Image (spheres, helix red, strand yellow):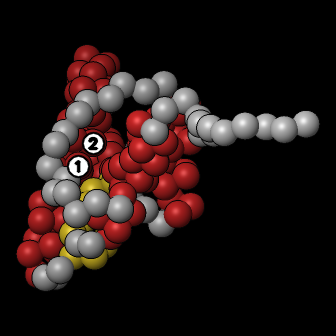
Amino acid sequence: MDARILMTKLEAAVERQLLMAGGQPEIEAAAAALLGVLEPALREAALELAGQAAAEVAAQLPGHQVDVVVVDGEPELRVRSEGDESAATGSSEPLDARITLRLPPQLKELIESSALERGESVNSWLVRSLSGVTIRASRGPGLKISGRIQT
């Protein structure tokens, strides 16, 4: 899905209406202000529509989940088997807990590209990566070896 297409079509429709208005400066300024305000709302609407599409597709594909993933600022649908995430984490635990995470934009882009390279959703990639790190951390600061060393 490309929200830019929606914005371009909206801008063209507004420009057609402006031509009919006769090029009055105050109307052009109001139209420009309106378009500026509408762009974030259109992006949000595109995400909402993608979420609705994902729910409809998931309802028609038993045994699969459909995720909405934002890549380069645009929503995409990703279809995966329901067992994919538990296999990736090595756990059969349900994945229904949520957390909000604020990231620097560059780190977010790196995470998205890493997930894309592996063919995973960002969520699956993060769960798998964090599971591996926390499992290693829970084992302690390294391997302990006991015994005697003879020289």
Left-right relation of 92 to 4:
left
Q: Is the residue 110 above or below the residue 113 in the image?
A: above
The crowding category of the residue bearing disc 1, from other C-alpha atoms within 10 Å (few below 14, some 14 to 19, many at least 20), is many
Residue type pointed to by label 1:
Leu
Instruction: Please name the residue shown 17% across and 80% down the image.
Output: 63
Instruction: Please name the residue shown 55% across and 30% down the image.
Output: 141
Q: CA distance from mark 1 to mark 2?
A: 6 Å
Circle on res. 28? none
Q: Is the residue 1 above or below the residue 102 in the image?
A: below
Q: What residue is shown with label 1?
A: 47
Q: Is the residue 131 above or below the residue 63 in the image?
A: above
Residue type pointed to by label 2:
Arg
| Tag 1 near tag 2, CB within 8 Å | yes
- Residue 140: image x %, image y %? 49, 32
- Residue 151: image x %, image y %? 91, 36
Quarter of the N terminus within the rendering? bottom left
> Residue 35 or 112: which is nearer the viewer?
112
Query: Which one is in front in this view, the residue at disc 1 or the one at disc 2?
Result: 1
Q: What residue is shown with label 2?
A: 43
Q: Secondary structure at mark 2?
A: helix
